Amino acid sequence: MSATKDNEVLNNDEDHWWSQISMSQLFTPQDPLPAPKPPDEQEQKLSTKQRKKKSRGNRAEQHFRRRLNRRNLDDASKASLIQARMKRQEQNVNKNNIETNQMEDDLQVTKSRGNRAEQHFRRRLNRRNLDEASKASLIQARMKRQEQNVNKNNIETNQMEDDLQVTEVPLNDIGHDGNSKKRKRDTSTNIQNHLSQSFSPLSISQGCRKKTKNHIRSEAIPLKTVQEKNDQSKASTKSFMSTYLPQYLTVSDRKFKEILSKSIHDGHKIYEWLDTDEKLKLTRQLAHSVNLIYYLKLQQQLWQDYYDLGIKDGVWTPRISKTKAKEHNTCLSYDGVWAPRISKVKAKEHNTCLSYGRSEKFVEQRQKTIQHQLNRTENELQQHLHHLAEWTDKAKPSIDSIFLSTAIERMVKNAQHRLNVEFQHKRIMLKLDVDDHHLITSVYDLEPTEEQIELIKIYWQTIADEQKALEEMEVLRKRASLKRLPKSLDNLVDQSADNIQTMLSRSILNKDRRASMASRCSKTITQYKGDLMEIAITIAYDTARGHAQLAFDTKNKLRLLDRNASQSTMELIIKAMEIRAENMKKRAQELLQYKLMSFFELAPVVINDEANVSTGAI
């Protein structure tokens, strides 16, 4: 009954008050409904709220102050600790700023503005108001001149580097024993003075060479330009001036007297004789002339060998081409008129030496130039000797001129020992290279087939690889006998023990126990280095044996290649091939002996109190 009444009230809504209200009166302008926002804006606002985090201050600083409060310190102690912390933070910030600035400076590069000389040249052409044809002709002429200058400089540079360049000879490297004691620098620290200075007192590494004192201007400096009295070609002068010789005119007075006095018995008298600047100057000039005489004679012998080889052949033509030289691991011809020139990059890639063909005219010109220089220097030497007899007789105290001249001659000969070795090696290699080219030609004169040529190339390449492996083995044996390890390997082994060295530096350790453990570590590292050298020698030896076996198999394949061919012809080819292989072995042996002598016997050696630690090894 009540439900029926409610329905009647709802249906009769016109009698109620809300029936009199219009829709416009429901919402007033003072309170409008907000417009719905786009979905993208809603998502962006939501994500911003999610990302936004409440800032809680410097948490590290808060933890630090909280730890201070727990320690129950007074205010003064807290203030000092806070101040020390702030100072450390400031130092770290400054350090980071410096490193950042250095990185930015390193990354800065200079802006490239092109070829300024070329730009100025074209600008000058534009100012002259020339037509296009005239500009093109001038530009082409300029490019041609530049190309000629580049080619000329390359030729002169190559001649200087390959023909006349010799090793730098220090004035103090006169002895041939290769052993000289040097004071070792103390590398121990206050914390680790109880430790040995090296984990391996018998280390077979090469040490770093000590820096020499600066009170001597130079013990080995390039030969200065000699004033030519007669006209000579620019190329010859540059080639002659490119060498390195002991410079007796500029070395210090103390060093000059020391070297001169050590070159002869009873040389201490020289200190008393050369007591004035004038006497020293005259003695220096005499030594300089003698030095040039011996050097020019070495050059004269080398160029005479070039000439004799050309005359012996009868003609001045190249024996083999560049292609054959590359294929057969040989050196380009020394005696050809138009022998091809190759770059250093190609020479390194193809395992051949870098040399240039020399015409008969070129060799004769070099001989004439050297002879002219030799005659002029001999005249100067005669004048110095004549002057020597005069001023030594008048000197007080009296000076024995014969004794002084003999001392100068011995000093120069001793100082040029390494130059003699260098030139002697050049002469031997010249003969071996020329023989190598003749032997290659003799094989091709037998007219082998294409298949035979391929096997011959493989055989010669295998011989070359075998000699490289044998050279590596001999160098390693020399290192082992002299206790010299390659520096890269030695540093790698020593760095692996850095952690142990740090542990041994702990002050809590007993001194006796620390010394005992350091000694054990040193012996272990030394034994490990010796084992590494032994393994390397064994690997090199097995490599050489493998190449030798491959060469033997290749020779057998060559014999079995064509049974229908004449047996005598095949044996002739094999014999010629083996003769060339023997010459390759001689050449490799000469290079090996020169390397061992140059880098081991003539290298400076540092004598340690505990053991011999040599430097200067290859």
Image (cartoon, rainbow, N blue to C red):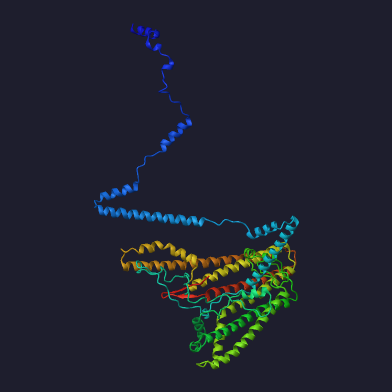
Q: Position of residue 61 (x, y in %)?
A: 33, 48
In this orientation, does residue 582 appear?
no
Q: Quadrant of residue 418?
A: bottom right
Q: How many marks?
A: 0
- Furthest toward the top, the residue is 1
Left or right of 288: which side holds 235? right
> Is 376 drawn above or below residue 321 in the view shown?
below
Q: Position of residue 337 (x, y in %)?
A: 73, 71
Q: Position of residue 234 (x, y in %)?
A: 67, 73
Q: Quadrant of residue 461?
A: bottom right
Residue closer to the observer: 231 or 400? 231
Q: Position of residue 585 (x, y in %)?
A: 62, 72
In this orientation, does residue 537 appear?
yes
Residue closer to the observer: 456 or 351? 351
Residue closer to the observer: 247 or 601? 247
Left or right of 565: which side holds 552? left
Q: Which quadrant is home to the N terminus?
A: top left
> Is 443 drawn above or below residue 108 in the view shown?
below
Q: Quadrant of residue 516?
A: bottom left
Kindly identify the residue that appears in the image at 75 percent across and 74 percent down: 315
